Amino acid sequence: MPLIEFTDRGLYCRAGGFYIDPWKAVDKAIITHAHSDHARWGSKYYLCHTQCKPLLQMRLGTNNYQTVEWEEKIFMNGIQVSLHPAGHMIGSSQIRIEYKGEVWVVSGDYKIEDDGLSGKFEPVKCNTFITESTFGLPIYNWKPQQEIFQNIQDWVARNRELGKTSVFIAYSLGKAQRLLQCLPELNLPIYVHGAIWNAHETLTGSGVQLPDVKRIDYDTPKGSYINNIIIAPPGAEGSSWMRRFFPYAVGICSGWMQVRGTVRRKNADAGFALSDHADWKGLLQAVKETEAGKVFVTHGYQAVFSRYLNEIGIEAAEVKTEYGNEEEENSIAITEQDNT
Amino acid sequence: MKQFADLVIKLGTSTKTNEKLGALSEYFSIANDKDKVWVIAIFSGRRPKRAVNSTQLWTWCNELAKLPDWLFEECYHAVGDLGETIALLLPEMTIADARPNGSSGRASHPLHYYLETLISIEKEDESVRKEFILRSWQTMTQAERFVFNKLITGNFRIGVSQNTMVNALSKTSKLESSIIAHRISGNWDPVTTNFSDLLSELAVTTDYSKPYPFYLAYAIEDEVNTLGEPNEWQAEWKWDGIRGQIIKRNHELFVWSRGEELMTEKFPEYHALKNHLPNGVVLDGEIIPYKSQSASSYGGGVEGAPLPFALLQTRIGRKNVTKKQLTEAPITFFAYDLLEYEGNDIRETLLVERRTLLEKIVKEINHPALLLSPVISFTTWAELTALRGQSRNLGSEGIMLKRKDSIYQVGRKRGDWWKWKIDPLVIDAVMIYAQKGHGRRSSLYTDYTFAVKDGDKLVGFTKAYSGLTDKEFAQVDNFVKRNSLEKFGPVRTVKPELVFEIAFEGIAASNRHKSGVALRFPRINRWRKDKTANEINTLDDLKKMLELYGK
């Protein structure tokens, strides 16, 4: 019996009696991070990292939560469980489980570069590694965060020369907070959409240090946006909600912006390939550093990445899950709520 | 190269014509003259011949990136553009290698250096060409590599019309845009032409082959009777050929297509006109496949319908025209305007006067390679509307309306000329294959193949790429991803469920297609969410259409 089985409810550890990031309601769930495709509603018990809990509460409401710190060992039915930084967003973790000397690690979503917010990704040695593959093609090669931040700042400056407001499209959880590491240097007022405001309040309320932002309300005078900075979630893009910022330029922050066609299809004025996922080299590096004898590849380019791993001598197989792409849809729902 | 790469990025991401215009004007005000000439050449379709082909670029990139071919291919399908795929896959380290002793300056050259070197090594050994490409890649940033690869492999497709470029030039050079459009037309070589000569008056007088910019019509938007008095308008049939100009100057004959391609050699039928046409004449009309009637009956006018456009296509791509093609796909010229007469530019004289001169010339020559596109006589809009209904039987796409007192303008303009096309043919079909699009649509399934019913089988008969809104494309894309049956390389077979109305302009018999028909300008007219796959049209319906309109 493998330590983790792939079931129609999610990744299941039968011996421990728990699921990891289940997509249906279960008795016991261990959550890698608070994005909606990994943290779903309805389970009776949630185990997550301390910093993840307030975010889960914001999204899923009151539940039976238990929190742990990274590296802290707990036992569930005799299975040893510990969480390790995944570098994806605040409170995001890899899940390590060990039983009779056999170790499995579920990566959740992760990135290798230390973004200064999410904790530095920790390679965890294991026998079996379950990895994401969102950007599992060699065309995805991220530039260092600092270089992208510079491009972002230059873009805002150019927009100001043209008398335009800079509107950034960024996920409310994760990307928006990363933007706040580079935008305050410009000393301009930063206005955020309600969804980002909620995340911001939750994070600062739980002790995360973030710069000041202003919430966009119906009674915010339109003149206050001119030449300044807006951060909005993907759902706001192209909606009537955006009209109040006119004249503005839209910059989308996402790994998908690596490809010009995507930038054009989104009708964005600029695309910044700022991602919270590992790029091709990052995925390879992570897989190799686990020294795992067997790799399961989930959501993303799983067919490509597992084939490549096999070709370079790492045994790998693809696994179908229900992760990926949900975050954006979720944000659209949030936008619509805020519009009513 | 950096300036040009910046320009291409700005043009590629800006969604508004004014921004593109701004970016181009800025470029024309800062770039060096040699580079400017090349940019004009590139955006008016005068790119140098391919010094290397895409397979070579692909191979050399892979040698550096060390990736298996299948993985390269996967990347290409995700990006949808070879030049961009290569730019993304080339390893970063090559840039560092090119910085001697860690200095930060790169040895990047101006745009014209790369283009002219590419031309100069075109005939060299493959190793020489490879050396140049690799060395160039190494001195370039990712954005520069992208534009460099695009210069080698094909079109930019970044939504810059020649018109936008001409307007930008006009803004920086303070010359009228119609004058610029004329001066940059025709036969000139970016290697030997310098910027000031290109835009000078001299260019027009020394180049005998120089065509005039074409005057193009918009589709009529309102009811035809909103155009006013019928007697102020000249009506002609709208032909489905290649718009062209025949020029006779200095005892030489030149044939230009609207795409500003010199096609004289492709159409030997016209060569006889060299001896018949007077010097200093420029004719505007349609290059069209057409079997002339018996010698006694052609009399300078069009009789009977042209042959299908597909026949003309068999000749366009060929370098040399064979005797067989000349017999099977004969062409003629339907003339409808005269732009130059006795060596004078007469575009400013009125259409009626130009027409009188045109008729005089064509009738005097009386040659089967040059026919008059007839004027349709009508007195009321109702009468013309009825006549328009017969367009398809005459092998025409509808009617052109031209104000009798109109001058010959430059480019696409509203007001004096309108095209009034007939409604397209339509057929309901089900989607059976889907493939990812290119460029803007590279991550979406937007290229579809459609089928009609043949008994209980489905027969694919056309592809269509356009006609849905972005939102609809996203919905269909979603359907494809959830309902794929099989995968053949980039193509997915899809559960035959979604029904679309396909519109097209013409239909011809074809032995290259399983269905036996080839459509002209197929596109998606609308998504028939009200229909199921059982209610689509049949192969017999298509064959009936072929019978009616395909001859």
Image: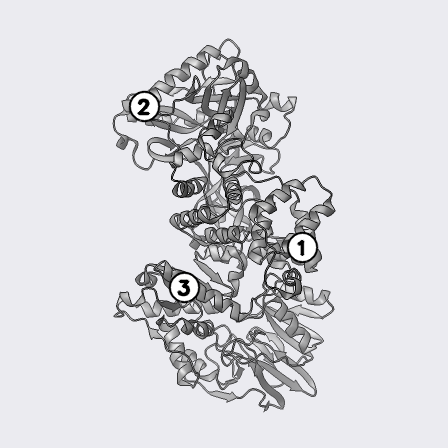
Give the chain letter at badge 2: B
For the point 63% across and 77% down, which residue is it?
A5
Q: Which residue is mark 3?
A: A157
List the residue tagged with mark 1: B61
- Regarding mark 2 in the picture, which secondary structure is present there? loop
What separation in Å lies between label 2 and label 1 (alpha carbons)? 58 Å
Which residue is at the front of the view, A245 or B488? A245
Name the residue nearer the viewer: A262 or B15.
B15
Q: Nearer the viewer, residue B482 or B333?
A: B333
Inspect this view and state whether residue A208 appears. Answer: yes
Q: Residues within 10 Å of mark 1 (few under 14, many from 20)?
A: many
Q: Which mark is residue A117?
A: none
Query: How far is disc 3 from disc 1 in space, using C-alphas?
Result: 36 Å
Q: Secondary structure at mark 3?
A: helix
Q: How is the image coloured?
A: one colour
User: Residue tagged by mark 2?
Assistant: B404
